[in-house]
Image: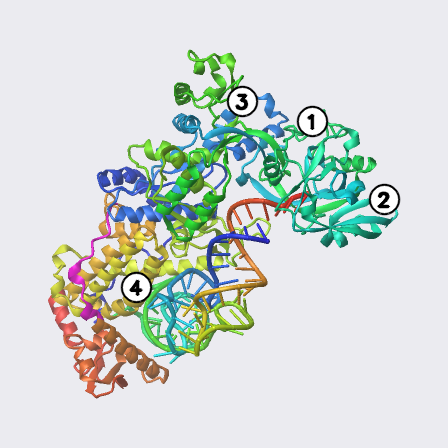
RNA sequence: AGGCGCGUAGCUCAGUUGGUUAGAGCGCACGACUGAUAAUCGUGAGGUCGGCAGUUCAAAUCUGCCCGUGCCUACCA
């Protein structure tokens, strides 16, 4: 007789091979038809809210690995919170304004030979809007393909009319409370884009600069030796010379007055001149200037320069102002001459130093990067292109002693890649100190919980040290700064009535209203339009996204402020966390978040950053196509995202291997539970000890997972689940229970107990995995419930059942498993000696203490060791010893155990009974 | 250049306040099973804990320096 048909082998439609790239879209469609997002909202209505506020990605370009990581991480968190029963409503958002989009549109114009400035601004803005919309839609699809669950039907964006109005209203608050002020400051200026740039818009590239050594003749000094000498400065930006107003020295530096005796042929420097430079730099400056021989006339301490007045190098050619010598800390002898030329309109240090000494800040440059026409010798010259010409002219007028070239890293625009200059321009600022913005923000940081904790210090020191927030941009695509300036006083108009009118107009027509509506409509009847200038600056986009708490969290009835969590990459300490904190503190006095979680950056498998030139970029699209979103999600959950995350072929393979283990565990459970129903269930107290042990583990792991969710320790959850599936389920529990499941009596309490435990296990395991493997968990769940209305994602993680907790049992089974490992070792030994092949051919004879032996009371030891029988001998040795004997008897044709009772080609007594009860 | 991080087996990660021979899983090698089968089980080999120096009876763990690497800032005259 063929007994195979009487064996209850696992049976399930849940396939071993996942085929995720094909299967996942089908599951997405099912969710869509179910309208699962709305269903979940209805189900969780009234429950405690959990709000992870989405930091808006920028709406241009396809999904890359960093965004995929970010979105998946958010989704895992939201799903876990939801499975704890909370109402975790995720509203995705997009950042839509700003330079990068504007630049794309300008680029299109240039290709078509059109000039941006000839296009009406409202038309231009419309194109930017369409561009943002297009990419928003694409990204939305990409995010959903990752399995991200959220309100994609009604996301937020920074460019809806409501958002634009709300952001303008926020600026109004800063205007009204006096924090917003008009200042003048050298800012990083792109002469190509004709705008000031934010720190975030700057990148550093190598750049070749013309360098000059310029002479500042001493005009008046109490050191009489200096009176016919020249102070020498070195600069990489000859175009700043017209803007020079001072020369800085350091008090501690030792300087030398030198007499030039002989110079190389063709050198600019001439013999018989007296120059002053830092002593330490003699050996670098003089050869650089081709000076061959010199002698030192005098050694001068830096502090002696106090009060010295110089002439401008071109004092005889229209630059006849006096140049003061000023002490400054930032002067070093690392480079140059030990003197720094100060152009207060063209450098941060210069500006501050000038301000301290009441030095005027001259304007020498227009928006296009040309020196102003009225400037002698240089009017109309370009700051990037004409430095060589400027050096020529200075050389001609005998105001140099040397020139050269230097390749150094230099700030460039992140879009146009053009070098930037410092330019003094009127800008709008939010004061960090006027209304205690800095201090209150720092206090709010103290109250915020950071994951990882190091983020606190990072954000803190940034806020502590940052200068006032430069809010204005000379751009078109963004929200106008809604301010009018009184022509006579130069003061901004601070009146809530006017702000309200502007906000109201923005609500109806968007911020285009600023350009389309007459000033009168905003100002009348209280003010006369002729008395005011309308500000044409656009707000920094960081202000847009920094206001999301106002127009999303506060405005939407399904959300709240503050959010439980803001979560972004660690670069956002400088970005969104920063601007959100300042905006909220400045307008409300509190932070918009209770917690901040930062993740690291995605690197390649060797820990290098991804770049096109290295060719080590991994695209999420490729992973989705070849492996599926669940693999990517597993990668996220399995990585320590507090640090940088690596990804590459080997790492992906690693996670697909882990995925297979998890999937096969689900599959084995489903197969073993084939045909299981409520009638078969029994009470936990009726179960065999092994099942009680299993439920104890479920209890423990469930507690552990719940704790780890609160601390966002997902890779720890992942490891715990995976190890459980491998070590405790597959190689221990499942392996042991195969005999009972396949050959045991379906009506017997043992097998019913086992299947009851498996059923519980399946419910827990699917709920633990659902937030991570959202597709696979659903597929397995559907295979179990066979009801598409009943999604795993509508469930919660079951409560931990205290009744299952049994520490004594746990200890006892630890020891049993240890003894089992000794038995397995001996079986392996016997196998290597070709004494046996299958473990069912073995009968271990175990010598151990009585205490150890007692562990097996009420336990079928042969089952535990997966042998046909077992025998025990007592001794007093702590470590049990094992001998392997060969099982005597014949092999049962049904359960394959070798037992004395079995006759040739027959079956054992147990199998005989089972068949009688179930098949006849 | 400065600030904040990181560097433990081929891979992903554990290593509590410094305390035996540094752990887990995967992968790999070898073997078994052929009733979880492109599965499953067993055994085994892999690490000067980035490097050097120091504190200590004792360092993966504390200190300093260096190297590599990431984010941020400044790259200045």
| Cα distance between the residues tagged 1 and 3 | 27 Å
The image's mark for residue A270 is: 2
The image's mark for residue A724 is: 4
A194 with respect to A856 (left or right): right
Q: Quadrant of residue A698?
A: bottom left
Query: Considering the numbered disc 3 on the image, is that residue within a helix, a strand or a loop?
Result: helix
Residue A526 image point, x, y percent = 42, 13
Q: Mark 1: give few (<14), some (14-19) or many (20+) Cα within 10 Å.
A: some
Query: Over which residues does the magenta segment extend?
Result: A794-810
| Cα distance between the residues tagged 4 and 1 | 74 Å
Give the chain of mark 3. Answer: A
Residue A155 image point, x, y percent = 37, 34
Instruction: Establish if A139 lies above or below A740.
Output: above
Is residue A798 one of those drawn in magenta? Answer: yes
Are the residues flagged by discs 4 and 1 in contact, CB closer than 8 Å?
no
Are the residues flagged by discs 2 and 1 in contact, CB closer than 8 Å?
no
Q: Mark 2: give few (<14), some (14-19) or many (20+) Cα within 10 Å.
A: many
| Cα distance between the residues tagged 3 and 2 | 56 Å
Q: Are the residues under marks 2 and 1 on the same chain?
A: yes
Give the chain of mark 1. Answer: A
Q: Quadrant of the N terminus of chain A?
A: bottom left
Are the residues flagged by discs 4 and 2 in contact, CB closer than 8 Å?
no
Q: Which residue is mark 1?
A: A372
Q: Nearer the viewer, residue A305 or A411?
A: A305
Mark whose residue sits in front, 2 or 1: 2
Give the chain of mark 2. Answer: A
| Cα distance between the residues tagged 4 and 3 | 62 Å
The image's mark for residue A121 is: 3
A276 with respect to B46 (left or right): right
Mark whose residue sits in front, 4 or 3: 3
| Cα distance between the residues tagged 4 and 2 | 83 Å
């Amino acid at each position: 007789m063929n007994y195979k048909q009487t064996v209850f082998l696992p049976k399930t439609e849940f396939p071993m091979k996942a085929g995720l790239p094909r299967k996942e879209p089908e599951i997405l469609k099912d969710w869509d038809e179910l309208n699962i997002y709305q269903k979940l909202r209805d189900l969780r209505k009234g429950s405690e809210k959990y709000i992870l506020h989405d930091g808006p990605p920028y709406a241009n370009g396809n999904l890359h690995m960093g965004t995929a990581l970010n979105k998946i991480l958010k989704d895992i968190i939201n799903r876990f919170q939801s499975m704890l029963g909370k109402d975790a409503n995720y509203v995705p958002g997009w950042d839509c304004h700003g330079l990068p989009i504007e630049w794309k549109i300008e680029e299109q114009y240039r290709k078509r030979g059109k000039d941006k400035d000839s296009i009406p601004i409202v038309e231009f803005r419309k194109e930017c809007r369409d561009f943002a919309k297009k990419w928003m839609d694409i990204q939305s699809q990409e995010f959903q393909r990752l399995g991200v669950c959220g309100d994609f039907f009604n996301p937020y964006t920074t460019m809806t009319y409501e958002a634009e109005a709300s952001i303008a209203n926020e600026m109004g608050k800063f205007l009204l409370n006096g924090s917003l002020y008009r200042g003048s400051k050298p800012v990083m200026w792109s002469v190509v884009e004709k705008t000031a740039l934010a720190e975030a818009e700057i990148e550093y590239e190598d750049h070749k600069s013309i360098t000059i050594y310029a002479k500042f003749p001493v005009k008046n000094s109490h050191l009489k030796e200096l009176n016919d000498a020249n102070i020498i400065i070195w600069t990489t930006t000859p175009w700043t010379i017209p803007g020079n107003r001072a020369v800085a020295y350091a008090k501690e530096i030792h300087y030398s007055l030198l007499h030039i005796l002989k110079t190389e042929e063709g050198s600019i420097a001439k013999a018989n001149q007296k120059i002053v430079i830092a002593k330490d730099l003699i050996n670098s400056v003089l050869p650089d200037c081709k000076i061959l021989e010199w002698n030192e006339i005098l050694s001068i301490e830096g502090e002696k320069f106090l009060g010295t007045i110089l002439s401008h190098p071109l004092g005889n050619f229209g630059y006849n102002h006096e140049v003061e010598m000023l002490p400054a800390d930032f002067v070093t002898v690392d480079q140059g001459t030990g003197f720094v030329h100060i152009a207060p309109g063209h450098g941060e240090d210069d500006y501050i130093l000038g301000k301290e000494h009441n030095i005027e800040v001259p304007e020498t440059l227009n928006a296009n990067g040309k020196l102003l026409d009225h400037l002698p010798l240089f009017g109309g010259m370009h700051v990037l292109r004409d430095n060589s010409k400027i050096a020529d002219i200075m050389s001609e007028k005998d105001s140099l002693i040397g020139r050269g070239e230097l390749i150094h890293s230099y700030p460039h625009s992140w879009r146009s890649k053009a070098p930037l200059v410092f330019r003094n321009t009127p800008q709008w600022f939010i004061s960090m100190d006027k209304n205690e913005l800095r201090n209150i923000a720092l206090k709010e940081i103290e109250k915020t919980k950071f994951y990882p904790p190091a983020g606190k210090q990072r954000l803190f020191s940034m806020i502590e040290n940052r200068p006032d927030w430069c809010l204005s941009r000379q751009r078109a695509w963004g929200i106008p700064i809604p301010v009018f300036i009184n022509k006579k006083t130069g003061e901004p108009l601070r009146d809530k009535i006017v702000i309200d009118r502007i906000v109201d107009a923005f609500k109806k027509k968007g911020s285009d209203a600023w350009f389309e509506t007459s000033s009168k409509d905003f100002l009348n009847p209280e003010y006369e339009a002729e008395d005011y200038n309308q500000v044409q600056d656009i707000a920094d986009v960081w202000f847009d996204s920094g206001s999301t708490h106002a127009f999303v969290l506060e405005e939407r009835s399904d959300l709240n402020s503050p959010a439980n969590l803001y979560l972004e990459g660690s670069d956002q300490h400088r970005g969104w966390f920063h601007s959100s904190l300042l905006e909220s503190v400045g307008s409300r006095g509190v932070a918009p978040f209770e917690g901040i979680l930062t993740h690291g950056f995605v690197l390649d498998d060797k820990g290098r950053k991804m770049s096109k030139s290295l060719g080590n970029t991994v695209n999420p699209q490729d992973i989705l196509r070849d492996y599926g979103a669940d693999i990517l999600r597993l990668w996220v959950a399995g990585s320590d995202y507090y640090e940088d995350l690596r990804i590459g072929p080997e790492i992906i393979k690693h996670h697909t291997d882990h995925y297979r283990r998890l999937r096969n565990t689900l599959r084995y459970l489903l197969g073993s539970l084939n045909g299981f129903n409520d009638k078969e269930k029994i009470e936990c107290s009726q179960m065999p000890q092994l099942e009680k042990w299993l439920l104890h583990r479920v209890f423990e792991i469930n507690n552990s997972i719940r704790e780890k969710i609160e601390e966002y320790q997902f890779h720890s959850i992942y490891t715990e689940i995976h190890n459980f599936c491998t070590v405790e389920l597959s190689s221990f529990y499942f392996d042991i229970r195969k005999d009972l499941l396949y050959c045991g009596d379906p009506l017997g309490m043992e097998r019913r107990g086992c299947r009851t435990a498996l059923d519980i296990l399946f419910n827990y395991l699917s709920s633990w995995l659902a937030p991570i493997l959202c597709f696979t968990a659903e597929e397995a769940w559907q295979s179990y419930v066979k009801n598409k209305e009943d999604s795993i994602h509508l469930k919660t993680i079951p409560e931990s059942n205290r009744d299952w907790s049994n520490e004594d049992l746990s200890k006892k089974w630890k020891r049993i498993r240890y003894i089992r490992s000794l038995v397995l070792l001996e079986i392996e030994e016997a196998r290597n000696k070709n004494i046996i092949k299958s473990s069912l051919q073995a009968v271990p004879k175990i010598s151990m203490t009585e205490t150890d032996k007692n562990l097996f009371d009420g336990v079928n030891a042969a089952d535990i060791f997966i042998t046909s029988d077992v025998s025990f001998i007592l001794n007093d040795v702590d470590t049990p010893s094992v001998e392997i004997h060969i099982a005597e008897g014949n092999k049962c044709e049904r359960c394959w155990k070798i037992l004395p009772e079995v006759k040739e080609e027959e079956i054992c007594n147990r199998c005989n009974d089972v068949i009688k009860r179930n098949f006849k």
